[in-house]
């Protein structure tokens, strides 16, 4: 299905040859944030149900992309789901059962930081499930997603693809950075060595689940900033929306004090160290 992209950065188009500068990135991101707010109001207004799935290799930039999408919208509309490893009880359930309670209701956008596709990726590569279970998942998922779409869910699936060298650089950067060390789990370290196992799993997953009703969209993410802008732009273009008319807002006058005085109370203020 997809040629291995271990050195994808060398084959990217010319626009990717230089990393996008922060100032240019922030300027474009601010514009897209305005549009995401418009989309949010439209989703609430029309009662849309949206699922956005993010998958990809470790270090591909899923978390940063999701943060860029959600930092200026309401968490009550844009809900991020990042499930932990299944409990023993969940392992005994039907596989998709633990995902279903998190599906969107009307007026919600659910963003999946990894999803039911764990079965076709990490669970398969790390031998957490049988090959029979994987084959069954790949066979049933297209029909499962067709039911989602037929029920009115807008389903978008993104695969963030990072090259070998850039992945190495990012994972090494986490080792000694106290802000990022939580991102480097023993599982990440183990899976790092299995690049081609992940490539094979990805290719078979695409072949089985890249459908007309729920296609996969691949995002080149060696340049994180471009990846974020491109993903948000594509998301916005994939859900037709209009600006919802809002009444003009004017702050009213504050009420009069009517004798109120600030309380004489020994408040414990946070020390001002900065």
Image (spheres, helix red, strand yellow):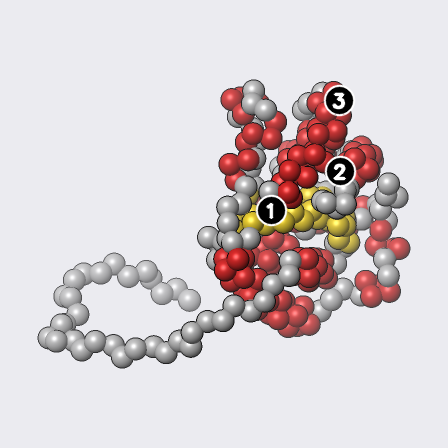
The answer to whether marks 3 and 2 mark residues whose Cβ atoms lie closer than 8 Å is: no
Q: Residues within 10 Å of mark 2 (few under 14, many from 20)?
A: many
Q: Quadrant of the N terminus?
A: top right
Tag 3 residue: 131
Tag 2 residue: 209
* Residue at x-position 75% and y-position 38%: 209
Q: Residues within 10 Å of mark 3 (few under 14, many from 20)?
A: some
Q: Nearer the viewer, residue 255 or 245?
A: 245
- Asked if residue 26 is positioned above or below residue 253 in the image, the reply reads above
Residue 269: image quadrant is bottom left
Q: Nearer the viewer, residue 187 or 4?
A: 4
Number of the front mark, 2 or 1: 1
* Residue at x-position 13% and y-position 72%: 260
Residue 108 vs residue 20: left or right?
left
Spatial CA distance of label 2 from label 1 is: 19 Å
Spatial CA distance of label 3 from label 2 is: 17 Å
The answer to whether marks 3 and 1 mark residues whose Cβ atoms lie closer than 8 Å is: no
Q: Nearer the viewer, residue 77 or 56?
A: 77
User: Looking at the image, is mark 2 or mark 1 earlier in the sequence?
Assistant: 1
Q: Quadrant of the C terminus?
A: bottom left
Spatial CA distance of label 3 from label 1 is: 32 Å
Q: Which mark is residue 273?
A: none
User: Looking at the image, is mark 3 or mark 1 earlier in the sequence?
Assistant: 3
User: Looking at the image, is mark 3 or mark 2 earlier in the sequence?
Assistant: 3
**SS class, disc 2:** helix
- Asked if residue 89 is positioned above or below residue 174 in the image, the reply reads above
Estimate the x, y position of residue 128 in percent, counting from the top left: 67, 24
Tag 1 residue: 152
Estimate the x, y position of residue 55 in percent, counting from the top left: 69, 43
Estimate the x, y position of residue 75 in percent, counting from the top left: 48, 53
Estimate the x, y position of residue 163 in percent, counting from the top left: 80, 48
Residue 40 vs residue 267: left or right?
right
């Amino acid at each position: 299905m997809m040629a291995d992209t271990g050195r994808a950065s060398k084959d990217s188009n010319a626009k990717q040859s230089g990393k996008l500068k922060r100032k240019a990135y922030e300027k474009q991101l601010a514009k897209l944030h305005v549009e995401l707010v418009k989309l949010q109001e439209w989703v609430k207004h029309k009662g849309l149900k949206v699922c956005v799935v993010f998958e990809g290799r470790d270090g591909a930039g899923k978390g940063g992309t999701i943060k860029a999408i959600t930092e200026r919208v309401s968490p009550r509309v844009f809900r991020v789901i990042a499930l932990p490893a299944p409990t023993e009880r969940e392992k005994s359930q039907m596989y998709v059962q633990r995902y279903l309670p998190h599906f969107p209701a009307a007026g919600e956008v659910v963003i999946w930081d990894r999803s039911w596709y764990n079965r076709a990726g990490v669970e398969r590569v790390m031998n957490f499930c049988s090959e029979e279970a994987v084959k069954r998942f790949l066979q049933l998922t297209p029909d499962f997603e067709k039911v989602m779409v037929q029920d009115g869910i807008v389903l978008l699936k993104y695969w963030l693809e990072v090259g070998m060298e850039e992945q190495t650089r990012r994972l090494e950067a986490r080792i000694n950075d106290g802000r990022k060390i939580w991102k480097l789990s023993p599982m990440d370290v183990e899976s790092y060595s299995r690049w081609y196992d992940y490539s094979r799993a990805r290719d078979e997953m695409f072949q089985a689940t890249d459908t007309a009703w729920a296609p996969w969209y691949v995002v080149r993410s060696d340049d994180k900033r471009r990846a974020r802008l491109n993903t948000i732009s594509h998301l916005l273009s994939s859900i037709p929306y209009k600006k919802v008319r809002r009444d003009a807002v004017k702050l009213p006058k504050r009420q009069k004090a009517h004798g109120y005085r600030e309380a004489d109370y020994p408040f414990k203020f946070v020390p001002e160290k900065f």
